[in-house]
Image (cartoon, rainbow, N blue to C red):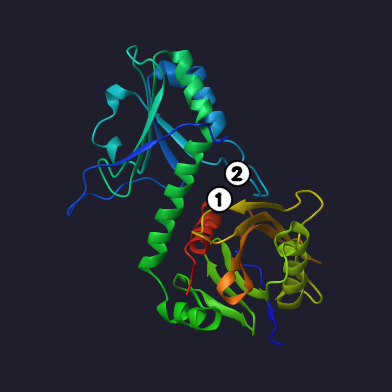
Amino acid sequence: MKRIKFLAGFLLAVIVLHACNGSQGNGMLSSTGRGGEVLVVCSDKQWKGELGDSLQAILMQYTAILPQYEPMFSLSHVSAERFNEIYQKQRNIIILSIDPSLEKGKAKVERNQWVSPQLVMRISANSAENLIAEVSARQEVIIKYLIESEMSRYLKLQKRGQDFRKSQQLEKKFNISLVVPEDFIFAVKDSNFCWLRRDIELGIQNIMIYTQDYVSTSQFSQKHIVQLRDSLTKRYVFGSVDSSYATTEKKYLPPEVKQCFSFENIYAVRTVGLWEMEGESKGGPFVSFTLLDEARNRVITLDAFLYAPGEKKRDMLRQLEAVLLGVRMR
């Protein structure tokens, strides 16, 4: 069996958001902004007061599963008076406003309003107090739209440098369509398992894919997912010293498993947690999706894990998760 050493060096509130398309067409400018950035448009008084505090508490909360604090999003602010063409190029924008004529709060989502890709969320209410309540009531929807916007952008970027040869190899091996970004290499290829890794300046990005025959729903439980994962990483993912291998951290931050609805007509669960190297001081976050492939009576798992000691990990992990979310059964 081939062994490769793993070396150091790396709420939904009950509302309806009306989505509408902004002006689109050839020649539309590209949006600006770093990964995870969100521009908030409201008055300076609102931003420095309870409304700003509420929004920051929602969007700058701890990003789950990372080993250190990183906000879910990075926020910046501009007043409506200063919201000009320069700011309108931002990729993710939340516009908050007060309209005394409104009987109740409202929200609207606009795509590619000024540039592309772009997500603009407008939330209005008839008073400052009610605007704060509207933001709080919609917090899970706001996060959902922003995460989807980030994942869509990352996947489009990955497609620009797709390694079609490796994608074809995965299609032939696992009967899936998956964008394999450039510079990923096969660290291990076995009958029902493969591990791809990419050495980047700040660490190592990894993707594991493995299958099993479908037997029962227990295969989507936390216990089974973690046990299977650990058996495979112990077999294939080794450290830089003798007898060291990767395993799932269970004591301080046990993995969380939740049903995932990102795959059309496919039952799936999303697992997030931390991994560590048994016998070495190494580790990092991981995210995986376990899907039921009814047509082939099998369960397939796509697992992304990151090693980037001392570095911010939010965006690097989202890049990997976006790749996994793009998988399709063939």
| Residue at screen point 62% across, 39% down | 62
- Given the current orientation, which residue lies at the most extreme bottom position? 1
Q: Of label 1 and label 2, which has the lower sequence position?
A: 2
User: Residue 125 lies in what quarter of the image?
Assistant: top left
| Residue at screen point 34% across, 16% down | 99
| Residue at screen point 76% across, 71% down | 245
Q: Amino acid at mark 2?
A: Thr
Mark 1 — residue? Answer: 314
User: Residue 288 lies in what quarter of the image?
Assistant: bottom right
Q: Is residue 291 left or right of residue 92?
A: right
Mark 2 — residue? Answer: 63
Q: CA distance from mark 1 to mark 2?
A: 7 Å
Is residue 240 visible in the rendered structure shown here?
Answer: no
Estimate the x, y position of residue 48 in percent, counting from the top left.
47, 19
Residue 122 vs 255, above or below: the answer is above
Whether label 1 touches label 2, CB < 8 Å = yes
